[in-house]
Image: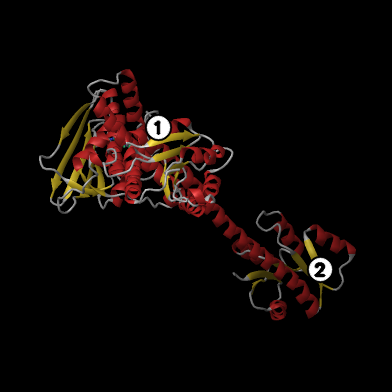
Amino acid sequence: MTSVHFLLVDDLEENLLSLEALLRRDGLELLKARSGDEALELLLHHEVALALVDVQMPGLNGFELAELMRGNERTRRIPLIFLTAGAADAQRRFRGYEAGAVDFIYKPIEADILRSKADVFFELHRQRQQLATQRDALEVQAQALRQADRRKDEFLATLAHELRNPLAPLRHGLDLLQHSREGSKATEILDIMDRQLTHLVRLIDDLLDVSRISQGKIVLRKERLELFNLIRAALETSRPLIEAANHELTLELPEATLWLEADLTRLAQVISNLLNNAVKYTPEGGHIRLVVKADGQEAVISVADNGVGIPPHMLASVFELFAQVDQHLDRAKGGLGIGLALVQQLVALHGGTVVVESEGCGKGSIFTLTVPLATGSAPSSSPSPSAIAGPPAAMARLKVLVVDDTQDVAQTTGWMLEELGHEYRLVHDGRKVLETTHAFQPDVILLDIGLPGMSGYEVCLALRQDPALKHLTIIAQTGWGQDRDKASAQAAGFDHYLVKPVGLRALGALMAELAAAKAAKPATPAT
Ligand code: ADP
């Protein structure tokens, strides 16, 4: 803590020295002035906790000094004690208080009186200093909270930005299928929707762990993938925008197959972000070039446009969060200024870099990203289509009870089970599960957690109490995917945990496992 300052004002040096000797203590610094002017000079440079002022001085006397101090914002609240020879008459005291005195001390000074009065102001100032330190600490905390809050807002903005991309092709695909189910493109459209839905689900998975991401911890799901698939995924998102703006797109792809160790969703998002920016910042009917090539151990992907360009002074900052070029006045098109920051972070997470070049306003821009190529070339095996086919002859047909209050979820799950060769029955209310279980005798129950009337946990606990049902496999199928939800499900007696949406492949794999286990088991007596 910094020292407390007292100002001593007396024209006689010996008085100043005796005051100094009486008041000296740790943490106290004494400023000595031999005149009112000297005192004013010291007051300009120091924060003073108490001024002890001799009344009678040549030049500016004590009262005049006090009046000047009262007239100044910086010094008006400094407590003043006047030192005066002999008992002052009422008139003098009155003038002194009017000038702002808090007290009088009479000469010859009694050491104890001086010290006890000075102590009060010393302690008062110390407490004020402590309060100020605490206030500063609180301000730092408040600032950290405000920053966290801003980061949360930034994060939500990022979220919306990221979710919108995959939604566009899903909307388009659905509209096209509703228009014509048998069209020649139906299979392709379904493939696109499948891929985009997978992207969406992955994004939501990450979003669930909001705190992790708001601390800047985005976990990549790297897999070995063909660069071409990445470009295709990015184009799926961006092509409608490119076409809507009548831009001409030129693609230059390498002959050889290039492999990356990358997160398809994130890197596709990076490329489509660059493409979308090229669309946004290029006047209609422009030209966009997407060039992909290998350079040594790296893949180089560049997106060039002949649009508005970027002025030289902004080239270094366009990747910063919220940075936007002011001259690009058509802000209706601009987003939140987070796209490029995200691009840079995601590329860095892949061990790559992204740079921008532009010769200035109106001269177009080129964004180039460089990411390491995967070493070796064997592709990772993806599950073969037979993995989602119905159960082989050796596998048992399962009876599955599907419990979900959302009828569409229950029905589509039922249809998937049928597709997989199993038998199903649907229930939409937790309270009906026990009764239906006894009547239907399922092998497996797919049980939603958030049910009206009786939660999935309660239903599971009730089922587990019935010894006649001990062979029953109970699977939680829920929208809650946090670790603690999984732990609660395990505690309630669930055997497996599936997070919605559960695709045909994942459901097929689990059912095949259960069917194989059932087939391997000796037959249970018929009930
Ligand atoms: P947003 O586009 O949402 O404003 P970005 O982070 O994607 O945010 O981009 C930041 C800024 O960089 C944009 O506001 C724009 O001024 C500039 N910019 C990005 N891409 C281009 C481009 N292809 N041509 C010209 N300027 C661009």
Residue 226 horizontal/vertical position (percent): 19, 43
Picture residue at 25% right of the left edge, 28% below the top:
187
Location of the N terminus by quadrant is bottom right
Of badges 2 and 1, the one in the foreground is 1
Residue 194 sits in which quadrant?
A: top left
Picture residue at 70% right of the left edge, 70% below the top:
122
Please determine whether, in this image, residue 168 is positioned above or below residue 270: above
In the image, farthest residue toward the left: 255
Residue 69 horizontal/vertical position (percent): 70, 58
Q: Which residue is mark 1?
A: 412
Which amino acid type is marked by label 1?
Answer: Thr
Q: Nearer the viewer, residue 89 or 189?
A: 189
Q: Which residue is mark 2?
A: 104
Note whether residue 478 is visible: no
Q: How is the image coloured?
A: secondary structure
CB of residue at label 1: within 8 Å of ligand 1?
Answer: no
Picture residue at 26% right of the left edge, 36% below the top:
233
Residue 225 sits in which quadrant?
A: top left
Q: Secondary structure at mark 1?
A: helix
